[in-house]
Amino acid sequence: MDNAQTDTILEIKDLSVSFDVYGSISHVLDGVSFRVNRGQRVGLVGESGCGKTTTLKAILNVLPPNAILNKGEILFEGHNVFTMVDRQLAEMRRTGAGMIFQDPSSALNPVFSIKQQFMAALKYAFPPNTPPKELYEIAVKALEDVMMPDPERIMNSFPYQLSGGMRQRVCIAMTIAAGRKLVLADEPGTSLDVTIQDQIMRLIDRLVQENDLSVIMVAHSLGVIREFTSYVNIMYAGTLVEGGKTRDVFENPRHPYTIALMACVPKLTGEGIAEGIPGRVPDYTAPPTGCRYFPRCPYAQEICRAKKPQPVEIDPGHWVSCYLANEVS
C-alpha cells in the first residue's frame, strides 16, 4: 500500500489472526498489510478493540496460546517472524524490536528494584561477556537521557516508589538503551495525565530523532498522531481502511470511518458537541462478510455487505478501501 521504495525494516503482508475463545472463533485481524521504512514513524489509529495491540504483539510473535494464525507473514528485515527459530526470534526481540506499553505499572515487576530489572534487560540485549559495570553505566546514561532526576537513586528504587510518569520514563529508557531499531509504542501516554503525557511524547520524539529509530505509534489521540507521525494507517475492526501520509489523510479523509473519526474531535471554537460514531465495533465471532464498517456506514450499498473492498490509490501514496472512494468526501 505504501509505494515508497526506501529501505524497509518491517513489512506485514495480509495478516489474519483469530482467537479460540471458549470454543468460539473470534476473527480479529483480517488481511492487515502495511510497511515501515527505516527512520519512519507510522501511526495506527482506531477505536478500542480494533486490533491495534494484537498487531503489535504479532510483530513480536508474542500472541497468546489461543491465537490462530490464519494466513499472512510479518517480515522483520526480510525474515518472517513466524518461521524464525528460537535463537533468531530472541535476537530480534533483543536488538530488533521492543515495545513501550501503555501501562508502565504492568510492565515493571513490583518486587524487584529498577536496577535489577534494568540490568536483566541489558544482559539480555548485550553480549554475555559485557562487564556488569559497563551495563550499569549504560543504564544510568539511559535514565539521564530520559531526564530522570538522580538516576542512581532511581536505580535503587522500586516501581511503587515512582510516579506513573517516572515509571514510563524507566520503560522508555530500557527500550532505547538496548539499541533496538524499531519501537512499538502502544499508547504510551494513556495512563498518565495530559501534562505528563505531553512530556512523554516529546521525550519519545527526541529520542527517536537522536537515534534514527523506526516507530509504530498506537494512539487514540488524533492530535498525537498528527504531530508525531509521518504516515498513518486507520484501522477498523481488524482491517485497515485508509492510509497515507499523515497530512494527506488528515486534510483529505476519504473513508467514511476516517471522516467519522475526524468529526469526533472537539473544536476549539466550541461549535457543537461531538456525538461520536453511531453503533459499535462488530462481534468478531460473526463479523460482516463484506466491509466490516457496513453496519455503521451512512453510505453503505449492497455490494458493501457482500464483498470486502480492496485498497484503491486515490492520490500518490494515499489509499482507501471503499467502493465509494472517489465519491465520499
Image (cartoon, rainbow, N blue to C red):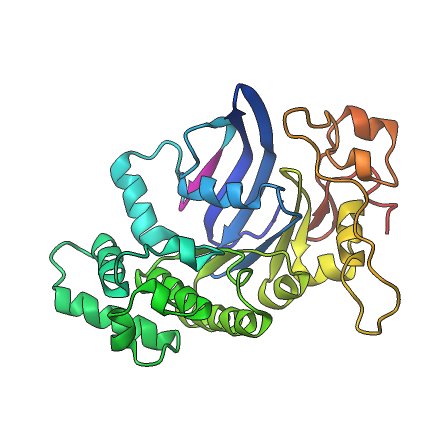
In this view, the residue farthest toward the bottom is 150
Q: Is residue 12 visible?
A: yes
Q: In the visual, does 212 lie left or right of 28? A: left
Residue depicted at 77% across the width and 46% down the height: 257
Rendered view: 102 above or below 212: above
Q: In the visual, does 80 lie left or right of 109? A: right
Q: In the visual, does 89 lie left or right of 17? A: left
Does residue 75 show up magenta in the picture? yes
Residue depicted at 82% across the width and 59% down the height: 274
Q: In the visual, does 185 lie left or right of 313? A: left
Q: Position of residue 193 (x, y in %)?
A: 56, 69
Total numbered labels = 0
Residue depicted at 32% across the width and 71% down the height: 142
Q: Position of residue 218 (x, y in %)?
A: 56, 54
Residue depicted at 47% across the width and 47% down the height: 10
Decide which of 278, 326 is in the foreground and name it.
278
Magenta-highlighted stretch: main secondary structure?
A: strand
Does residue 123 show up magenta in the picture? no
Q: Can you tell which quarter of the image residue 59 is in?
A: top left
Q: Is residue 99 visible?
A: no
The N terminus: image quadrant? top right
Q: Can you tell which quarter of the image residue 179 is in?
A: bottom left
Q: Which residues are magenta?
A: 73-77
